[in-house]
Image (cartoon, grey):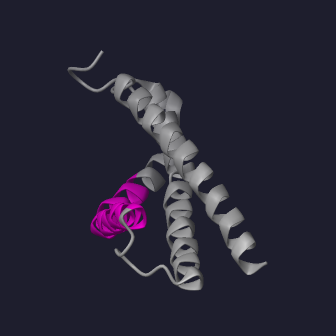
Amino acid sequence: MLLKTLLTIHIFGVIIWIGFGLYELLLHREIRNARGTAIEIALIRVSGRYGGIVAIATLVVAVTGVFMTNLLGLGYFQELWLGILQAIMLAILVDMVLLIPTYVRSYKEIGALRDTPVAKVSAMPGHT
């Protein structure tokens, strides 16, 4: 019963992780396209509001994966298919840890943007 529950949570975590990851990718592309316009700030606010969901889903996938690996007694980096998935997740988690200062700085800047009315923002010089 515990294994089925963990597997269900793991699968939902993967779906949310991939879905919001694609959403974030597309949203950041739109932010880049709107650079220097008033809509850029609104898009950055949306990104800041929902960006943490990908990190939470990643941690849910990692934690449930560790529990399932331990329950099944498969070990770490012993089975080829599982070892590849574990290596990918380890690389993603290391990347997330290294990016924490960037995330903190970005969320502070997004917080400062919340106090800026979108209507009062003019286009940046050199960007049209």
Range of residues picked out in magenta: 81-109
Q: Which of 96 and 6 lies nearest the eye of the viewer?
A: 6
Depth check: 25 or 76 in front? 76
Is residue 54 visible in the rendered structure shown here? yes
Residue at image coords 37%, 23%: 33
Q: Residue at x 33, y 66 (%)?
A: 87
Observer able to see residue 121: no
Q: Nearer the viewer, residue 27 or 111?
A: 27
Please state the horizontal and vertical placement of residue 110, each as a whole percent of the image: 44, 51
Q: Is residue 101 magenta?
A: yes
Q: Is residue 11 above or below residue 31?
A: below
- Residue 107: percent from left, percent from top: 43, 58
Q: Is residue 86 above or below residue 110?
A: below
| Residue that sits furthest to the right in the current view | 1
- The image quadrant where one finds the C terminus is top left
104 vs 5, left or right, is left
- Of all residues shown, which one is farthest toward the left? 126
Residue at x-position 33% and y-position 70%:
97
